[in-house]
Amino acid sequence: AQSVAQPEDQVNVAEGNPLTVKCTYSVSGNPYLFWYVQYPNRGLQFLLKYITGDNLVKGSYGFEAEFNKSQTSFHLKKPSALVSDSALYFCAVRDLDRYNFNKFYFGSGTKLNVKP
Amino acid sequence: NAGVTQTPKFQVLKTGQSMTLQCAQDMNHEYMSWYRQDPGMGLRLIHYSVGAGITDQGEVPNGYNVSRSTTEDFPLRLLSAAPSQTSVYFCASRHGQGDVQPQHFGDGTRLSIL
């Protein structure tokens, strides 16, 4: 079965510093990987996805993610963190079922705290 | 364009009571899903639908029923609530055609079972 792991429950960074939120995956076949962000009392919002092509994927709000096949990782990055980036971040991988439906498996989430 | 709308936002139930969580989307999405979110466990798929009249089970389907009579609506039913079903429930929808489309999530229903 497909799965993702987020090894850090929480990441603390100072505003203006670069940030990295880690994700590793375990899949059979080609991975389809996603990052979502969740603000308090809201649903998840899509940030970016990797399907194929360039290993560096650019997404919303200045975020990007680097796909590394040899390390089976898909880390989320941003060159300069903002206080408003503080939120819960989820990595996800898709699997296919008998209907060819994309079922998504989510990591446990990483809380990002950006301090002024 | 409202997106994905979930009602109610909050609910407290007693053990053994039944209720239906409502989910509606106005984007004409074929695919709809229900997830539950528990601390430290991310989101887990309960049930999903690939179109009107077609549903299937996800990772944690026990204790929940769904139906999909229209494209717009995908209600989740708890037949006999248990404290283990205390959670935040999210409905999501997306297009089924073409590339792997991202999901659109509602703002959640916070459910407590006493």
Image: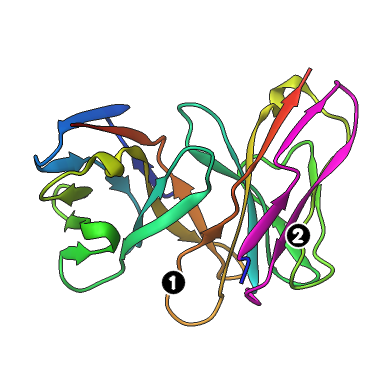
Examine the structure image and report whether residue B24 is included in the region drawn in magenta: yes
Q: Are marks 1 and 2 in contact (CB under 8 Å)?
A: no
Which residue shows up at 52% across the image and 41% down it?
B43
Q: Chain of mark 2?
A: B
The quadrant of the rendering that contains the N terminus of chain B is bottom right
Q: Which dot marks residue A62?
A: none
Percent coordinates x, y for residue A7 in the rendering: 28, 31
* Observer-nearest of A60 and A48: A60
Q: Amino acid at mark 1?
A: Val
Per the image, the residue denoted by label 2 is: B74
Which residue shows up at 12% across the image and 47% down it?
A80
Residue neighbourhood size for the residue with mark 2, other residues' Cα within 10 Å, grouped as few (<14), some (14–19), many (≥20): many
Query: Considering only vertical position in the picture, is A27 above or below A90?
Result: below
Percent coordinates x, y for residue A113 in the rendering: 27, 31
Percent coordinates x, y for residue A69 in the rendering: 17, 56
* Observer-nearest of B95 and A3: B95
Residue neighbourhood size for the residue with mark 1, other residues' Cα within 10 Å, grouped as few (<14), some (14–19), many (≥20): some
Which residue shows up at 71% across the image and 57% down it?
B56
Q: Chain of mark 1?
A: B
**Where does the magenta region start and end?**
B3-29
Percent coordinates x, y for residue B17 in the rendering: 90, 29
Per the image, the residue denoted by label 1 is: B100
